[in-house]
Image: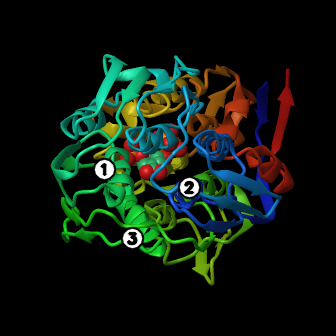
Amino acid sequence: MDIIVTPTGRLQGEIQALSSKNYTTRYLLVAALTEGTSTILYPAHSEDGEAMRRCIRDLGAVVEEDEEKIVITGFGRNPRPVKELDVGNAGAVLRFLMSVAALLDEVTFVNTYPQSLGKRPHDDLITALQSMGVRIEHQNGRLPMTIRGGSPRGGKIQVSGSVSSQFLSSLLFVTPLLDEDSEIEVLHDLKSKVVIGQTLEVLAQAGIVVEASEDLMHYRIPGRQKYKAQTYTVQGDYPGSAAILAAASVTESDVVVHRLMEHSKQGERAVVDVLRAMNVPLTHENGIVHVKGNARLIAGEFDGDEFTDGVLAMVAAAVFAEGTSRFYNVENLRYKECDRITDYLTELRKAGANVEEKQDEIIVHGRPDGVEGGVEIDAHFDHRVIMALTVVGLRAKQPIRIKDAHHVAKSYPQYFDHLMSLGANVQWVE
Ligand SMILES: O=C(O)C1=C[C@@H](OP(=O)(O)O)[C@@H](O)[C@H](O)C1
Ligand SMILES: C=C(OP(=O)(O)O)C(=O)O
């Protein structure tokens, strides 16, 4: 399915933010690693959430759900043997479950998205798991992958954090269940460091003890721990809401988004500050972001690693800003659902934006008068490219057509419904 985005001058209305993808995947995982019964309130209903549900069920968790909650009886440290797991296009789900799979004799992760997740590298986690005695057959660090584990060793573990924080999160989830105590040292840099805060928060909620150094590069994890059954409430999602807030910022608007906690550990919370720095009139109080957009933005310079999943939406806003914006420290965007620097900028240029790339930077020469539009966009299987190009389309001179826009459902299936409810001219076509 494609979407046609027709220029829209004004957005107005109120929406409830979607539920957080990153908290949903984490709560599902820790509930599965618990022997008792946990409840997750307001889980995200998206393809990635569904992928984690499907896989933990395959691994032996009992999962019952209705619209508002999921009740899970977990398998603790004894997942049920399963031949294959299909994580869809969900990177975090794959990486988190690679360590869980290490508890089994043999599991194969299949490759159902060869053009997206199938291209993403997992070498750093593979190396770490191998050092723990796990054997892994892989395609140059990529899917499909067969993991032969059983009883992985703890002890001293090293993992590189220069491509993704998900490798470290994965090890932090499984090491508490091992017989031995573990010490994890993060090598090189740790990208998306803020996301580790969410992992540590969820582990603490599940009653797991982890000692982390202040710089988040060293950890001590006692072994033989047990995850505790809990009730978890999923908060609103900043990365998806970033696109709605960007849309409200590039138009004349009066848009209210509920369920966005000011003190959330989601790094993408920073998009509120980014938009404020770009002179967007907004308030953020009591979990409510209120944008009264005047369609006039000014450029800025930002460390994108602090709000990794919000960068594309902020770049889309910067396309209409007065001046040149710079989003630096973003190299790891190249290893996401697509190359979110080269592929994304190719599509932005088609739509008429003036953008440049470096290996780890996106530079945007703003066009406050708008961009031409009138083109077809290749979404590269990437939900965040779809959302961001929609923002650009709202302020293009001619409609743009985004091919295969249904991939937005990876994280935010109701994105276009939400935009339509705010008055955006968007339309699904076959
Ligand atoms: O741990 C997580 O849930 C995630 C970590 C981030 O990935 P990287 O650490 O690869 O940047 C983020 O982009 C992804 O959407 C979810
Ligand atoms: C990169 C993302 O997800 P993942 O790595 O979990 O596929 C994302 O949601 O933007």
The span from disc 3 to disc 2 (Cα, nearest Å) is 14 Å
The residue that disc 2 covers is 32
Q: Quarter holding the C terminus?
A: top right
Which of the two discs, 3 and 2, labels the residue nearer the N terminus?
A: 2
Residue 337 x %, y %: 50, 31
Residue that sits furthest to the bottom in the current view: 286
- Residue count near mark 1 (Cα–Cα under 10 Å), binned few <14, some 14–19, many ≥20: many
The span from disc 2 to disc 1 (Cα, nearest Å) is 19 Å
Which of the two discs, 2 and 1, labels the residue nearer the N terminus?
A: 2
Does the beta carbon of the residue at mark 1 sit less than 8 Å from ligand 1? no
Q: Quadrant of residue 12?
A: bottom right
- Residue count near mark 2 (Cα–Cα under 10 Å), binned few <14, some 14–19, many ≥20: many
The residue that disc 3 covers is 208
- Secondary structure beneath disc 2? helix
In the rendered view, does 388 fall on the left or right side of 300? right
- Residue count near mark 3 (Cα–Cα under 10 Å), binned few <14, some 14–19, many ≥20: many
Residue depicted at x 53% and y 77%: 262
Residue depicted at x 61% and y 21%: 378
Residue toward you, 400 or 352: 400
